[in-house]
Amino acid sequence: MTVVNPIDLETITLLKGGHDDKTPGEWCFMEAVAYIAGEKWSANPKCACPVITSFMIGWNDRIGDDETRTRLLAPLLLKVLGTRSTVFVEMERRWMLADWVVRVVSPIWLRAAGLDADAAMLEALDPIVDRATADAVYAATRPIRDRAWQRRTELRQKLRSAVAVAADADAADAAAVAAVRSQVWNETYDKVYRETYDRLLPICRERFAGTIAIVEQSAVELVEHLCEMGKTAA
């Protein structure tokens, strides 16, 4: 597809969230795609496949800092141009995305958590290529989903207990404890949760830096493949 508005990929910075067209250079990934294509300012440019667009918007906003976002995503800008294709190609891309999440990304994270058997189980599943294979995978992975949900519940309960202990320690007497728990529980929980999240996120990113890098590279390769599918079909 013809580039209408060239931009310097070496100096561009991709930002989180949506922006307007009043400040040149302030854009997320898909807004930059629309600008390059010469389209009306939008995060849903007509030149791009909606499946790829949805994936890129989510990925763009989940990356924690501008430097990492730009380093990973800027090289993909020109590749996404012209990926709008047929409904058939869109469905192929949807199934490929689902397959990637189940049989590629999930096993990576399961192994990072020490759940090697569950990771191997996912990798051994048949590829997701249509509704029938998707339904089969959904049924086969229920035990893994249940275990993951149970673990999540346990961790959230630990956090709630920690908040309750903090409230008890700060209260002067039993009546104050009851007041804290009943009247400002949500505010207290949310505050502690946010503070804990902000404190632990950098630690988690450092602890799982290797795993994150593997997932990021896999995502880049996935998008490149998705883009080539559409352009080949077109």
Image (cartoon, rainbow, N blue to C red):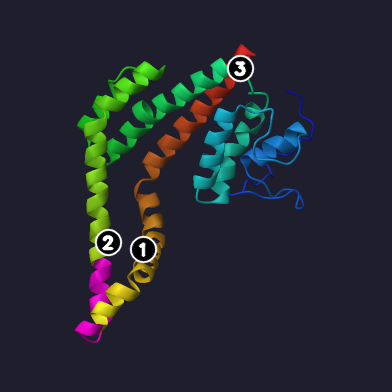
Q: Nearer the viewer, mark 2 or mark 3?
A: 3
Residue at the image point whose x is 59% and y is 49% from the top: 17
- Check the image and name the residue furthest to the front: 182
Magenta region: 162-175
**For the residue marked with disc 2, what is the amino acid?**
Leu
Which residue carries the number 3 mark? 86
- Which mark is drawn over residue 193? 1
Residue 49: which disc?
A: none
Q: Are marks 2 and 3 in contact (CB under 8 Å)?
A: no
Locate residue 124 relative to residue 98 in the image: left or right: left
Badge 1 marks a residue whose secondary structure is: helix
Q: How many marks?
A: 3
* Residue 150 spot, x, y in % from top left: 22, 45
Left or right: residue 18 compared with residue 178 = right
Decide which of tag 1 and tag 3 comes sooner along the chain: 3
Q: Is residue 8 magenta?
A: no
Q: Secondary structure at mark 2?
A: helix
Give the labeled residue for mark 2.
159
109 shown above or below 67: above
The residue at 50%/18% (across/down) is 92
Q: Amino acid at mark 3?
A: Thr
Q: Amino acid at mark 1?
A: Tyr
Can you see residue 26?
yes
Return the residue nearer the eye: 23 or 207: 23
Give the CA distance from mark 2 to mark 3.
47 Å
Q: Quadrant of the C terminus?
A: top right
What is the C-alpha distance between the residues marked 1 and 2?
A: 8 Å
Residue 135 is left or right of residue 64, and the answer is left
Q: Is residue 114 visible?
A: no
